[in-house]
């Protein structure tokens, strides 16, 4: 397959949906197919999950992240370290003995849990699905709450085929919150909902893009409404490279929605060569802001 056909193939498969940073990998290409499939299936069957979240793919997606992490631990280490460092900087600016809310807690690989539980009186980890890794890490911590919650507050609409997107309101009136963290979540928020709408309700490419923009912008607006410190870590750009290391494609991870604050950026080798395809690799450009309320408004184009 030549460079042009690889680029076209990638764009056809991923550009419309803006690949979720944990896009599922075909187990057929994994070197440990049988073991990986067995472990994934067991976890999938044993993890509590709402019917809606299961049908929309959130459980399968979460389980797939575990498998990808085990294969790409070395390539992900720099990104996870810098994500944790951004959060540690945010912790240093937040009032002690307050509550911290983490949107997109995921599997906890990018969370400095020890520092969080030492500084805050309550640590609320929010996600639609909580799988074994995060449950194991927080099992003996009385300060940690694993909350199952739809961050967008719009999934029921989407599940029923309605495209109306709400601006979330959860926790805005909670005066105990001293820090809010949106962690490697923003670019992912629209991925599975849009995929579900395309599959079950046949929405067009333009409709998918518009709904994605609305979901992403609603989350950014939501973060700005908090009367407290807010930390944001998100990928803002996708970079696709061929097997020779030359760039094939580069595009927004946020459907063109702009992040209005300046921050630190780094690269995340989310899918090394051979992980998704033998012909290309995928690298994310990530933005980390320890506190958007004090960050300069230079603007980063996502």
Image (cartoon, grey):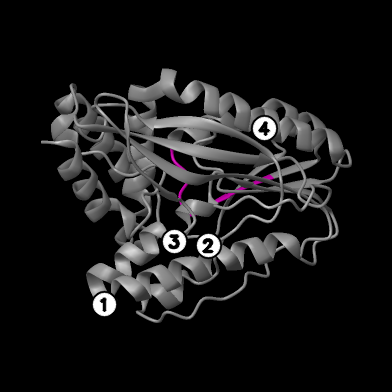
Q: What's drawn in magenta, residue-wise?
A: 124-131
Left/right of residue 66 with respect to residue 105 in the rendered view:
left
What residue is rendered at 32% in x and 29% in y?
246
Label 1 – label 2 distance at C-alpha: 21 Å
Q: Which residue is mark 4?
A: 141
Rendered view: 74 above or below 223: above
Label 4 – label 3 distance at C-alpha: 32 Å
Query: Which SS class for mark 4?
Result: loop
Q: Say which label, 3 or 2, has the lower sequence index.
A: 2
Q: Which residue is mark 2?
A: 150
Q: Which numbered tag is attached to residue 201?
A: 1
Measured from the top left, where is residue 282 in percent x and y? 35, 36
**Residue 132 seen in the current view:** yes
Q: Quadrant of residue 199?
A: bottom left
Measured from the top left, where is residue 125 in percent x and y? 61, 46
Q: Which numbered tag is attached to residue 190?
A: 3
**Residue 139 seen in the current view:** no
What residue is rendered at 63% in x and 55% in y?
259
Label 3 – label 2 distance at C-alpha: 12 Å
Which residue occupies the extreme left position in the image? 1
Label 2 – label 4 distance at C-alpha: 23 Å
């Amino acid at each position: 397959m030549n460079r042009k056909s690889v680029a076209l193939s990638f764009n056809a498969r991923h550009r419309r949906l803006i690949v979720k940073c944990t896009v599922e990998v075909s187990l057929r290409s994994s070197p440990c197919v049988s073991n990986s499939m067995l472990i994934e299936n067991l976890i999938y069957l044993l993890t509590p999950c709402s019917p809606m979240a299961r049908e929309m793919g959130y459980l399968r997606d979460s389980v797939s992240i575990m498998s990808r992490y085990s294969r790409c631990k070395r390539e992900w280490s720099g990104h996870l370290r810098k994500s944790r460092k951004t959060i540690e900087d945010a912790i240093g600016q937040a009032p002690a003995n307050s509550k911290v809310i983490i949107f997109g807690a995921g599997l906890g690989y990018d969370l400095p849990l020890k520092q969080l539980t030492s500084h805050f009186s309550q640590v609320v980890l929010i996600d639609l699905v909580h799988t074994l890794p995060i449950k194991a890490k927080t099992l003996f911590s009385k300060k940690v709450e694993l909350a199952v919650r739809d961050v967008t507050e719009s999934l029921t609409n989407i599940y029923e085929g309605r495209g109306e997107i709400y601006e979330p309101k959860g926790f805005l009136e909670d005066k105990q919150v001293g820090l809010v963290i949106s962690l490697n979540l923003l670019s992912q928020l629209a991925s599975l909902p849009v995929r579900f709408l395309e599959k079950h309700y046949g929405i067009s490419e333009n409709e998918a893009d518009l709904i994605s923009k609305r979901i992403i912008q609603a989350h950014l607006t939501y973060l700005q409404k908090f009367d407290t410190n807010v930390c944001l870590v998100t990928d803002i750009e996708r970079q696709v490279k061929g097997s020779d290391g030359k760039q094939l494609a580069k595009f927004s991870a946020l459907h063109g929605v702009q992040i209005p604050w300046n921050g630190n950026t780094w690269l995340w080798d989310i899918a090394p060569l051979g992980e998704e395809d033998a012909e290309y690799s995928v690298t994310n450009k990530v933005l980390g802001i320890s506190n958007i309320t004090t960050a300069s408004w230079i603007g980063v184009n996502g």
